[in-house]
Image: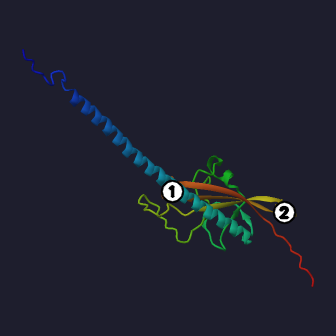
């Protein structure tokens, strides 16, 4: 008696089902990887725009500090408009920015007063390319940075000798879109010091 073997009688398509399941798993993994790469690119782009906005805000803040330190703050006014900065043009404001803008939150930009007018000083950074539209290209900014100098009054000098005028400087900078903005703030004191001359 001879028995002939029967191959494949018990498989019933298991190889096909296993192959399809393996293909589905590999496809899901590949889609997840591509989605992850896209998310990483978005995170990197957002981080770059945040840094550009912060650097623009810091540049305006440093300009405002320089402007105050060079003795340009000749008088304090009630600020109601937006002006452009220059060596001879600027403003120190009696109305502090938190009391002027809506809800007292200086992070709500652009800064507007109760009459819906923008306030502050626009600092036109040399070499900065600005495009205020939806077609902002790489390397351009949504808007020039703006600073606002609030006069806080007379306070003690850091050296402990005499007094000085105390100012609060708020500055906002933008990246490539109006939703990418950074706000920085500093307190600055200007003191005039009389240096005695030695007689020879």
Residue 7: percent from the left, percent from the top? 14, 24
* Numbered tag placed on residue 86 in the rendering: none
Numbered disc 2: secondary structure: loop
Position of 25 relative to 123 (above/below) = above
Which residue is found at the position 67% from the left and 55% from the top? 97
What quarter of the picture does the N terminus occupy? top left
What x and y, as percent, mark residue 133?
44, 60
Q: Left or right: where does residue 35 sit relative to residue 139?
A: left
Task: Out of 11 and 102, give the one closest to the viewer.
Answer: 11
Residue placed most toward the observer, 86 or 2? 2
Marks 2 and 1: CB-CB under 8 Å? no
- Image point (26%, 30%), residue name: 18
Q: Which residue is mark 2?
A: 159
Question: In the image, 134: left or right of 53?
Answer: left
Q: CA distance from mark 2 to mark 1?
A: 39 Å
Q: Tell me the quarter of the picture where residue 80 sits.
A: bottom right
Please report the residue visible at 50 percent of the width from the left and 62 percent of the height from the top. Answer: 141
Residue lying furthest bottom in this view? 200
């Amino acid at each position: 008696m001879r028995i002939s073997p029967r191959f494949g009688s018990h498989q019933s398509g298991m190889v096909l089902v296993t192959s399809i399941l393996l293909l589905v798993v590999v496809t899901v993994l590949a889609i997840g990887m591509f989605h992850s790469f896209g998310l990483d690119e978005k995170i990197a782009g957002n981080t770059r725009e945040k840094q550009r906005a912060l650097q623009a805000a810091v540049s305006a803040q440093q300009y405002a500090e320089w402007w105050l330190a060079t003795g340009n703050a000749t008088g304090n006014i009630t600020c109601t408009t937006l002006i452009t900065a220059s060596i001879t043009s600027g403003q120190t404001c009696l109305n502090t920015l938190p009391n002027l803008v809506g809800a007292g939150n200086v992070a709500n930009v652009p800064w507007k007063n109760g009459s819906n007018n923008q306030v502050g000083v626009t600092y036109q950074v040399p070499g900065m390319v600005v495009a205020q539209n939806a077609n902002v290209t790489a390397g351009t900014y949504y808007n020039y940075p703006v600073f606002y100098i609030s006069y806080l009054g007379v306070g003690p000098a850091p050296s402990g000798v005499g007094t000085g005028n105390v100012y609060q400087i708020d500055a906002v900078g933008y990246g490539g879109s109006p939703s990418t903005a950074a706000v920085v703030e500093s307190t600055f004191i200007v003191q005039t010091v009389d240096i005695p001359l030695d007689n020879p």
